[in-house]
Amino acid sequence: MALPPHILQKVLDLVPDMCFVLRSDLTIIDCNRRARAVTGLSTTLQGTVTFPALLTSDSPRPPFDTLGGANGFSETEVRFHQTARRAMDALVSVRCIEDGDDRLFFVFGRDISESKQRELDLLRFSNVVHYTVNPIQITDAQGRMIYVNPAFERSTGYSKEELIGQNPSVISSKKYTSEFWSRVWDTISSGKVWNSEVENRRKDGTPIFAQLLISPIMDMEGKVVGYLGSHRDITEQKALEQQLMHSQKMESIGTLAAGIAHEVGNPLTSISSIVQVLQRTVDDEFARDKLGLVQSQVHRITKIIRDLVDFSRPSNYQVQPTDVVKVLADAVEIVKMGKKAKEVTFSTNVRHRIPLLPLVPDQLAQVFINILLNAVDSLHGKKGIIATDFERDDDSVLVTITDNGEGISSENLAKVFEPFFTTKRVGEGTGLGLWVSYGIIRSFRGDIGVTSERGKGTSFRIQVPLNPKDYSHG
């Protein structure tokens, strides 16, 4: 039994997609409620509107002319005009039914605007990722690389064929413990972002320093399905920081070395010459032994001066077990050789046993020397005390260096770690010492702070983790 027209119309209106019925000349003789909502067609069409008129000027057209007989079906992506809205992308299916000499076209249109937008967004994202200057890697949920961009290939020296399917550890510097990476994995697998400074290795073994951000990729249900790693190469920045640190070290230690060479070198030469003359002319065995002792001490002082000069040479920045107390003691001995430190009393108080820490000894010494020299300068050659206290807890070692010098004004206290800030006269300092010191301690994943009161003295507090396994030097 054929359905009455009004029942057929109700059935068509229930269909969520657009439905059109066209004559062979492509005029529309009927459509459903969804089609009218999209195109603005009235309920009384009377064959006055053609289907192509509903499409934008740049839209593809279904191949109506080729349909018929055995070839009675086609699918085409088109774009519909919409009332007061942007054009709608749709997938149009056309079926041709022949009735004697006449033909009818049944057109069904499905809105694919959202999927087209998602495709466009994905294309934009993929182009951004592919052509960005930052190295990018994408892994699956198990951590195997499934994509690397050209910048990642250039940065690491590996081709994508060598990297796809591999674990990111292929570029690891091997300087980080399994516990460190376990903490990273726990963070990202729980859906959180991880961000830190790391050292990797190129294919040829040269180091790459990078600010690494690992972001989980989540599906619609909130399940982690992969990870995106973004590397910001800071290798050049690290090199510049090391150059700056070396420059400041040469300024502070070089000044001391030059002063010592001038004040001690000439008298030492005279003493050494006199001792050598006496050794050749004195026959008394006891005197000769004592002169030999004097000569050995002269050599020892000469070696100290030579070590000071050697200290100004570039560091290899190798992490090694470091006795923080001894580094401070050595720094004090160096600073005590300066003219301004003659009236200064140095004291050290170690409250707890301090273990060896994996640090860079000469960088730590540079920090201590910078702070000690500033403390000496604050006394202006007068009698004073510079006291150092060592403490530790379960997580860190705290070193406090306190002087009873002139102190720092409240307006200058917030600026002491800023580069090029100095209260010294022109030619006496560059204002880089404390800034460099701050950078060194922060690179150890530590912290440095200062308190001061004008006229009463200054106290620097240096905190270094007991196990700084994830800091930038290794």
Image (cartoon, rainbow, N blue to C red):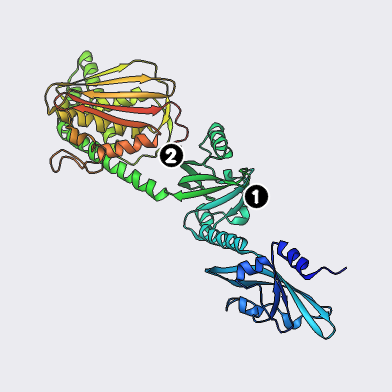
At horizontal 42% and vertical 48% (from top left) the residue drawn is 235
Task: Decide which of 153, 418 is in the foreground and name it.
Answer: 418
Residue depicted at 60% across the width and 54% down the height: 147
- Which residue is identified by label 2? 472
* Residue 200 place in picture, x, y as percent: 50, 44
Graded by Cα atoms within 10 Å as few (under 14), some (14 to 19) or many (20 or more), the crowding at tag 2 reads some
- 131 and 63: which one is in front? 63
Whether residue 420 is visible to the viewer of this picture, yes or no, is yes
Quadrant assignment, res 81: bottom right
Picture quarter with the N terminus: bottom right
Q: Quadrant of residue 379?
A: top left
The residue furthest right is 1
Residue 165, label in figure:
1
Seen in the image, is 252 located left or right of residue 137? left
The answer to whether one can see residue 273 in this image is no
Q: CA distance from mark 1 to mark 2?
A: 27 Å
| Amino acid beneath label 2 | Ser
117 lies above or below 266: below
Residue closest to the far top: 286
Q: Secondary structure at mark 1?
A: loop
Q: Earlier in the sequence, mark 1 or mark 2?
A: 1
User: Which amino acid type is shown beneath numbered disc 1?
Assistant: Gly
At which x and y percent is residue 208? 47, 47
